[in-house]
């Protein structure tokens, strides 16, 4: 059964606005509901979404990070990094996204107390973007996905592109990624990607 609609608005938008007022900004885009909140209100908003009997957003699907440092268009939130939480209500089979943002050097509260499943996705964002989650902080000298001696955060916009030589078990090295690049549909004006025809041109 779909989420109820009250006066043309989804139930979640109405209830969040009633409870939190201007602490939340609701955006309905292409049929998806986005809830923008400041870091200080993140845990309270998410706990309400999970525990309220009318909504029951009990399933934490994932959270992802975004680096907007090179973005020049309009934005929903001011911080350099956004973290977007994908939440699912098993009661109504409905989905919504909670967004918050943070600048480099600041931290976000962890959502582990709300959903235990937030631990690993948050640690991935820490490892790849350098966003710190209070209560789920990096272990001293330990990376999560990357080798412990890795320097930097590879999904930040300033991180250099390219690859490195692959050392094979025989001691020889393979080519770096830039040595093997082939044109793809977005780069090929002849309408081909590699050696195969690309339809629609």
Image (spheres, rainbow, N blue to C red):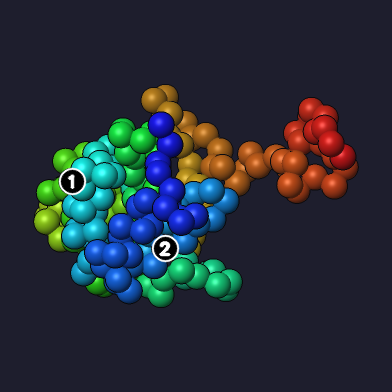
In the image, taking residue 191 as reference, residue 17 lies left or right, namely: left
- Residue at the spot of label 1: 51
Residue 137 % position (x, y):
15, 56
Circle 2 sits on which residue?
A: 26
Give how far across and how far down residue 21 sits, in percent: 30, 71
Query: In the figure, is residue 178 to the left or right of 157?
Result: right
Q: Position of residue 58 (x, y in %)?
A: 24, 39
Identify the residue at image location x=33%, y=44%: 87
Give SS at disc 2. strand
Q: Earlier in the sequence, mark 2 or mark 1?
A: 2
Residue name at image x 39 percent, y 67 percent: 25
Relative placement, left or right, of 200 versus 154 is right
Position of 193 relative to 32 (above/below): above
What is the residue that sits farthest to the top in this orientation? 170
Residue count near mark 1 (Cα–Cα under 10 Å), binned few <14, some 14–19, many ≥20: few
140 left or right of 155? left
> Which label is found at residue 89?
none
Q: Secondary structure at mark 1?
A: helix
User: Closer to the camera, 99 or 83?
Assistant: 99
Res 59 visible: yes
Number of marks: 2
Quarter of the image that includes the C terminus? top right
Viewer-nearest residue: 61 or 52: 52
């Amino acid at each position: 059964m779909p989420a109820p609609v009250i006066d043309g608005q989804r139930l979640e938008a109405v209830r969040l606005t009633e409870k939190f007022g201007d602490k939340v900004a609701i955006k309905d885009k292409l049929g998806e509901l986005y809830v923008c909140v400041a870091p200080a209100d993140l845990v309270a908003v998410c706990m309400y979404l999970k525990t309220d009997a009318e909504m029951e957003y009990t399933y934490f699907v994932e959270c992802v990070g975004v680096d907007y440092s090179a973005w020049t268009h309009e934005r929903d939130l001011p911080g350099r990094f956004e973290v977007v939480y994908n939440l699912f209500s098993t009661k109504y089979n409905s989905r919504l996204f909670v967004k918050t943002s943070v600048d480099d050097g600041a931290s976000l509260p962890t959502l582990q107390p709300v959903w235990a499943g937030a631990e690993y996705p948050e640690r991935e964002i820490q490892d790849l973007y350098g966003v710190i989650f209070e209560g789920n902080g990096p272990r001293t000298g330990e990376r999560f996905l990357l080798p412990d001696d890795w320097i930097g955060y590879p999904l930040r916009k300033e991180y250099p592109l390219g690859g490195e030589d692959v050392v094979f078990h025989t001691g020889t090295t393979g080519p770096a990624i830039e040595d093997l690049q082939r044109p793809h549909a977005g780069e090929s004006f002849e309408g081909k990607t590699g050696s195969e025809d690309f339809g629609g041109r």
